Amino acid sequence: MCLGGLSFRGVTHYDARAASPRHPLQLSKESFVSKRSVVSALRWSCAGMAVFLAGCNMEVLSPKGDVGMHEKNLILIALGLMSVVVIPVIVLTLWFAWRYRASNSKATYAPKWAHSTKIEAVMWGIPCVIIAILAVITWRSTHALDPYKPLASDVKPVTIEAVALDWKWLFIYPDYGVASVNQIAFPVDTPVNFKITSATVMNAFFIPQLGSQIYAMNGMQTQLHLIAREAGSYDGLSSNFSGAGFSDMRFTALATSAQGFQDWLAKAKASAAALDAPAYQALEQPSEKVPVSYYATVAPGLFDEILHKDLGGTTGAQPMQGMPEHDGVAAASAHNDHAKAAE
């Protein structure tokens, strides 16, 4: 490039008087883009991607349940559709850099070129089609994978009440009268209905290989329905930063046979600990790297009491009767009204 007879360092200089639409652009030997630079940039890009992806755990792409499998398919479909645009752009960018490098005297110089209907149609048409396809897929999958929608099954589901604490997970089995910390178990091919809340700040409940993340919020109840199709031990975590012990706020989800689940319940019932009010108050205190523990009995209505208690420890004067469980905003509003009335 030359402005007023001055050439800028790093930019190719050419003689504008020797160039014309009918003749190739006359370039100097100093090349701004060369084959070596293109290959070097490509190598560094690949190396950078390898470094950034080295620490990734691809659990989401190795699903063990119906919900996780559907979500994996959505990820791959979206990735494929985006690749229709991304891959050609990357290839053409590298090709343009090589084709119109400074040392290529065969590159046509056409300074008066300004418009191409064909190029405009391709550049606008393909993205519009992709967006339309993604919109349809998003609409259908959003309703099909609604976390509040129970999974169709002839098997009676297992209900687990999950409570996010600082910095551990409390799980209550209301149908069996037991509880555990940082570990859950359920039979394979059996729907699991989670009722989720937080006794502290916002967290997010997530078992990557089974699918769907959903938030745990104080004074609100969210729901999640999952199912495992393969026996195994799956990692669970909080995927929302919540303080100093967040990185160790993990739990294990054990998908077992029916007999294995009964054995796990028997192990919990054999525990000497009882989750009564004093035990819960002690558990509620902030702690990190908490080992797995079990409770043979649980105080009746403990989950509802936690749900209706705000961060200041105030409990509403009366429970929220007749309110849909999934209406978190309305539930929080009503809870605040009850708390003010109690004051």
Image: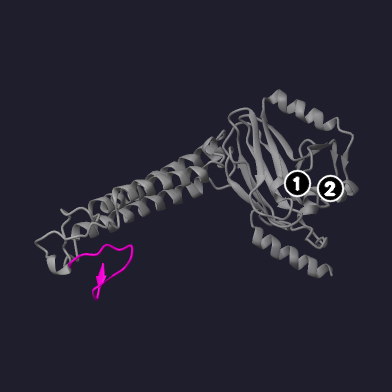
User: Would residue 282 appear left or right of 209 to someone viewing this image?
Assistant: right
Q: Is residue 164 magenta?
A: no
Amino acid on which disc 1 is placed: Lys
Q: Which residue is mark 1?
A: 168
The x, y position of residue 261, in whole percent, is 72, 28
Q: What kind of element bears circle 1?
A: strand
Which residue sits furthest top?
259
Q: In the shown orientation, is residue 27 left or right of residue 213? A: left
Residue at the location (55% across, 48% down)?
146
Q: Secondary structure at mark 2?
A: helix
- The answer to the question of whether label 1 and label 2 lie on touching residues, with beta carbons closer than 8 A, is yes
From which residue to which does the magenta span run? 1-15
Q: Quadrant of residue 201?
A: bottom right
Residue at image coords 69%, 60%: 331
Question: Which residue extends farthest left?
Answer: 22
Classify 10 Å Cα crowding around label 2: few (below 14), some (14-19), many (20 and above): some
- Residue 246 coordinates in the image, percent (x, y): 70, 50
What is the quadrant of the C terminus in the image? bottom right
Q: Is residue 200 left or right of residue 190?
A: right
